[in-house]
Image: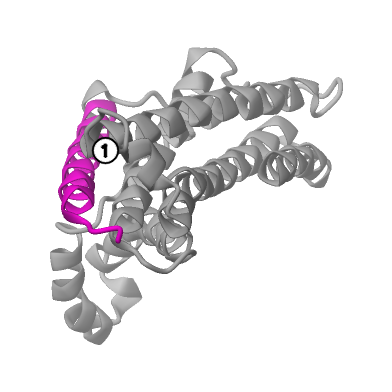
Amino acid sequence: MLILVLGMLLVGVAFLAASFSPRQPKTVTMDVGFSGVRFSLVLFAVFWVQELVGREVERRTVLYALAYPVGRAAYLLGRFFGVLGLLAVAAVMLGGLLWLSVVLSGGQYVQGYTVQTGWPYWLAIGGLWTDAVVVAAFSLWIASLSTVQMLPVALGALFAVAGKSLGAVLDYLERGADGDQELAGRYGPLLQIIQYLLPDLSRLDWRVWPMYGIPLSEGAVAYGLLLAAAYVTILLAMAVMTFSRREFF
């Protein structure tokens, strides 16, 4: 509940941020709002996984659920898809609130170019939801093996930050790191390895279309979704294998 209130407050901040841009108020509202929605969905993902899996394991109440004739894989995947459904509801609620804020921001002022509040806008919200799904899958894997209560929350949040930053860092190094060849030579090879282990969640950030009217290629959207699906599948398989072998006594 507190995270939902926080998300609504962040959308309200996005609406107020339009006052600081006399020429592009709707664009500013949408940009700040998308960041707020992503932040809220990531928090929802890690905390819901912790509540539905991590806390039950810690309190040993998971044993009551596993006493029924249902496999551990079904138990874990059921919890995961429940989190996905809750994330979808949260994304629609916060996305609708942000949409209303964008429509109302700026008053009677007409921008030089209009923002897209149709399906490109909801495609961007869908990308943020997919981003949160990947974070939820990682948090679920950590919860399946962790014996520390808040470890899934902490590592899930770090995973979300690292995945979002990876694309920007790689792009910066590929452009020459502003002429700092030593920096590029020192960290470039390491980041090339990390990109095969960590998903580039920035590929799911599609806000440029609704904000600036720059259409995304079908290949870019498909690649982002394929990348997310691959990581979610791998993480779920790892979580199921770990959870199936875990002893709770």
Mark 1 residue type: Ala
Residue drawn at point x = 30 percent, y = 53 percent: 144
Q: Residue furthest bottom?
A: 182
130 or 184: nearer the viewer? 130
From the top left corner, tell me how far across and down residue 14 is, in percent.
Answer: 73, 41
Q: In this view, does 151 lie to the left or right of 172?
A: right
**In this view, 40 is above or below 113:** below
Give the quadrant of the N terminus.
Answer: top right
Residue 233 falls within the magenta-colored stretch: yes
Residue 204: quadrant of the picture: top left
Residue tagged by mark 1? 228
Residue 194: quadrant of the picture: bottom left
From the top left corner, tell me how far across and down residue 26 is, in percent.
Answer: 70, 30
Prevailing secondary structure of the magenta residues: helix
232 or 79: nearer the viewer? 79
Residue drawn at point x = 29 percent, y = 50 percent: 200
Q: In this view, does 149 lie to the left or right of 98?
A: left
Span shown in magenta: 221-249
Residue drawn at point x = 32 percent, y = 58 percent: 142
Q: In this view, does 87 lie to the left or right of 16?
A: left
Q: What element carries label 1?
A: helix
**In this view, 77 is above or below 54:** above
29 or 142: nearer the viewer? 142
Residue 225 falls within the magenta-colored stretch: yes
114 or 221: nearer the viewer? 221
Q: Can residue 209 be seen in this view?
A: no
